[in-house]
Image (cartoon, helix red, strand yellow):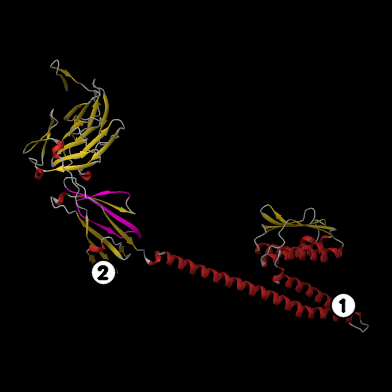
Amino acid sequence: LAVYHRQTETLRPFSPAIPSKVKPAATEYFLENEDGSIWVATASEGLFRFSGKGKLLQQFSTESKPALSNNHVLVLHADAQGLVWIGTFGGGLNCFDPATKTMRIFTKKEGLSDDNVTGILSDGQGKIWVSTYNGLSCYRKADGTFQSFYEEDGLSGNEFNYTSFFKDKEGRLWFGGMNGVNVFRPENFLEQKLNPPLCFTNFSKYSRRTDSLETWLPGSRESEVIVISPYDSYFQIDWALPNYFRPGKNRFYVWLEGLDEGWYFLGNTPSIRYNQLPDGHYILHVKGSDSKGNWSEKELAIPIRVKPFFYQTWWFVLACATLAAGVAYAVARYRLQHLLEMERLRTRIASDLHDEVGSMLSGLAMQAEILELSKAPHDFSRLRHISQISRQAVTKMRDMVWSIDSRRDYLKNLLDRMREHAEEVLAQRNITVLFQAGELPPEKKLAVDVRQQLFYIFKEALTNIARHSGATEVTIRFGNSGHHFELYIHDNGRTSGPKKSSTGLGLANMKMRAEKIGASLEVTHDDGFSVLLRMKKL
């Protein structure tokens, strides 16, 4: 490379510092910016920016940040605002802002006449003129829109030559093409007008339920809400832009409000199809422009409602919830009634046992005692045995009645029964009882099995103490400790002797009862007889 000095009419070599990783590439275009930097466009390695002394300041490519749309750069142009416009081969028009270090890309999608850019000029009125392989485009910075011109608009041809462009001192723009040179004053060339509004021309949908295609013309129904059944596989909406000059070059943008995040380019197809949209309310917005970039006067807005399946409606969900609540209520009521029936049955059985069987056993015991006290000759030992058995039967029956009586399901009833039994069994043997009950909710209702097994374990432990211990004092602790409930029974009796062999069956029964209610049971004979039951907190 070399730099030509006009004043001295000499050439000075320009040897920029190019990284070794950059592959050799043909140079397409040069641009010297107002800040003295030199921009070099290449055919395959993108765009390079050097200082006036050849130091590499920045390289732009499809991999850089910001990135080019294509690494083949054909032309460059710097406008009065300092923006650098970059024309590419196949990637459209790029615009780099040195102040914000951002890159904007314009292609046919944004309204450019073609993605192969051959020339770029500013007209000094806020517009950028771009020649391409297929027409001439004018970009308006004010509103960000393009207006394009073609051979039928007066140009010598649609294909322009690479680097064949120039702006003279009078402000006229020159663009050379395959069929000659085009020269014009921008202020006299532009003419922009609004197109008539878009027209909604046709609607069609396919129903899976009826296996048929339904089509209708909007006409007076254009403003009505289009209702889509959940059984419709797809629906299609067609429209038209009433501009019949090169209609194939019309461009359309659509936005389905309620689904899309914003506008997207549809191309030149004046229709759109949607397949099985989620239920909900939508508005289809459509706007269009003709081949010259003239926009339709008013965008099209079509309201759409997609109905849900019946099982997705609020009333169906409410009905199911109501039905579920009704079933749950019925089940709960049935269970409550069943529990009440069971409690009434338990109360009735307890009352019948107490009134009928209890009275009979008590009467039998009394008769045996009367016979024993009479002076008539009898077998006194047998009568005494009958009397003892009768009294034992009454006691056991009373315990059984208490255990199944639903009126005794509360914690306070269990405590009262334990105290009563301790007095009955131990006090008559002159054994002192220390009963310690922790802070427990007296009105707490216990499960029948828990209440029964706790009492029977307690009863068995006291029976062992009364029969085999020889103790003079018994300590009973009953209450919650941390996260557990504990029942602790301890006496000061013998620690060895016949007790271990004579109570084996009773201890086995106690452990079996503890397992039934998920409790652990520890029985020790060191320093007296001790029983510790631990289960979940009451």
Instruction: Locate residue 317 relative to residue 292 in the image: left or right.
Output: right
Residue stretch rendered in magenta on the structure: 261-290
The residue lying furthest to the bottom in this view is 376
x, y percentage for residue 31? 19, 27
Mark drawn on residue 519? none
Question: What residue is at 40 percent from the left and 64 percent from the top?
Answer: 313
x, y percentage for residue 299? 25, 52
- How many numbered marks does the figure carry? 2
x, y percentage for residue 353? 74, 77
Which residue is more in the foreground, 152 or 494?
152
Q: Main secondary structure of the magenta part?
A: strand
Q: Amino acid at mark 2?
A: Asp
Numbered disc 2: secondary structure: loop
Instruction: Locate residue 164 relative to residue 48 in the image: left or right.
Output: left
Residue designated by label 1: 381
x, y percentage for residue 134? 13, 42
Residue designated by label 2: 211
Q: Amino acid at mark 1?
A: Ser
Location of residue 187 (image quadrant): top left
Question: What residue is at 80 percent from the left and 73 percent from the top?
Answer: 392
